Amino acid sequence: MTGTASDCSLAGRILFIEDIDEYLYNIDRMMVHLDRTGKLASLAGLLVGHFTDSNDNLIPFGQTPYEIIRTYAAKYDFPVAYGFPVGHEPLNMALICGRAAHMVVDEAGVHLNYVSVAQHTEAALG
């Protein structure tokens, strides 16, 4: 979608990614694209859900989906949560897409807190 009318800014946003039945080299290609277009550089955080039934080629790619993602995320200083319980698995929590949220990753785990509309409006107005 980059470079089209459907493109969006990820600056200051928490990006959520997950996939099902995807080849490892495609996951790498998508991460290269996000990196080279500058989309990763401005993130506020990255939530990585399930990568269910990932595929490999006859010549192994050599990394798991999380290792591929970690390679690109490690270049930046945003928090990353791996194994977030969203995707195509029995434990599939709901995410509210497009709602303001705050994400903290620490020793206790990941905390994703949604900001109320009033709090978000107040913060935007300053």
Image (cartoon, grey):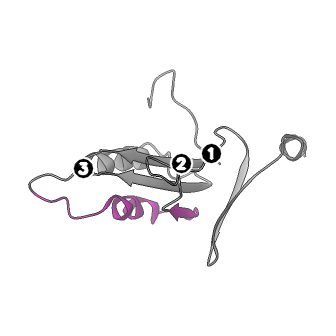
Residue positioned 44% across, 31% down in the render: 2
Please name whichever residue, 78 or 82, is drawn nearer the observer in this view of the structure: 82
- Which residue is farthest top? 5
Q: What is the CA distance from the residue labelled 2 to the residue labelled 3? A: 19 Å
Residue 80 colored in magenta in the image: yes
Q: Check disc 1: other Cα within 10 Å, few if <14, some if 14-19, many if 20+.
A: few
Q: Which residues are magenta?
A: 59-82
Residue 122 colored in magenta in the image: no
In this image, 24 relative to 91: left or right? left
Please name whichever residue, 66 or 51, is drawn nearer the observer in this view of the structure: 51
Which of pointers 1 and 2 lies earlier in the amino acid sequence?
A: 2
Which of pointers 2 and 3 lies earlier in the amino acid sequence?
A: 2
Residue type, mark 1 in image: Leu
* Residue 106 picture quarter: bottom right
Residue type, mark 3 in image: Tyr
Residue type, mark 2 in image: Phe
For the residues labelled 1 and 3, say whether their Cβ atoms are less than 8 Å apart.
no
Check residue 16 in the rendering and tell me which mark sits there, or answer none.
2
- Would you place residue 71 above or below residue 36 in this image? below
Where is residue 46 drawn, in percent x and y?
54, 55
